[in-house]
Image (spheres, helix red, strand yellow):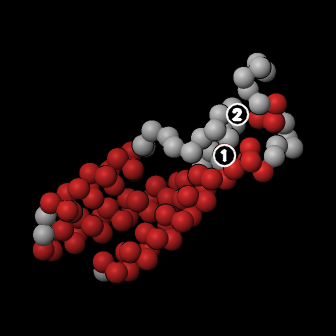
């Protein structure tokens, strides 16, 4: 353990702050590089905005499904509590928006 890594990152009794915002290496992790589902969602969302009619609706549904997949992955495997809560909130909002699209 070096002096830049918080002691609590290597301890079983980490503080609530550490569990919420730090990853397993002690880094504060709120944003990360987008993974494949998030990149796919961005592309599909832009495509849905550039189209109209039934095609736009189908692309919007596909975008919502991909975003829901990303949210489930975050909920299940997020690096900290913040990322898991973010996954839960995005999943809930995505399911609500999906009911409005369909």
Residue at 77 percent of width and 20 percent of height: 3
Residue at 62 percent of width and 45 percent of height: 79
Numbered label tally: 2
In this rendering, would 90 be left or right of 65?
right
Q: Is 29 located above or below residue 82 in the figure?
A: above
Label number found at residue 21: 1
Q: Is 53 located above or below residue 23 in the figure?
A: below
In this rendering, would 10 be left or right of 71?
right
Which of the 4 quarters of the picture holds residue 47?
Answer: bottom left
Q: Is residue 10 visible?
A: no
Q: Nearer the viewer, residue 78 or 21?
A: 21
Q: Could you say whether the residue bearing mark 2 is in a helix, strand or loop?
A: loop
**Disc 2 residue crowd, few under 14, some 14–19, many 20+, Cα 10 Å:** some
Where is residue 85 shown, x and y percent of the image?
A: 61, 59
Which of the 4 quarters of the picture holds residue 29?
Answer: top right
Residue behind mark 2: 26
Q: Is residue 61 visible?
A: yes
Q: Is 23 located above or below residue 75 in the figure?
A: above
Which of the 4 quarters of the picture holds residue 4?
Answer: top right
């Amino acid at each position: 353990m070096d002096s830049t890594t918080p002691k609590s990152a290597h301890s079983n009794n980490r503080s609530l702050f550490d569990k919420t915002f730090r990853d397993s290496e002690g880094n504060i992790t709120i944003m990360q590089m987008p993974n494949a589902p998030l990149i796919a969602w961005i592309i599909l969302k832009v495509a849905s905005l550039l189209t109209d009619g039934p095609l736009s609706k189908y692309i919007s549904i596909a975008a919502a499904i991909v975003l829901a997949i990303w949210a489930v992955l975050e909920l299940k495997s997020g690096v900290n509590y913040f990322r898991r809560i973010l996954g839960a909130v995005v999943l809930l909002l995505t399911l609500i928006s999906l009911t409005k699209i369909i």
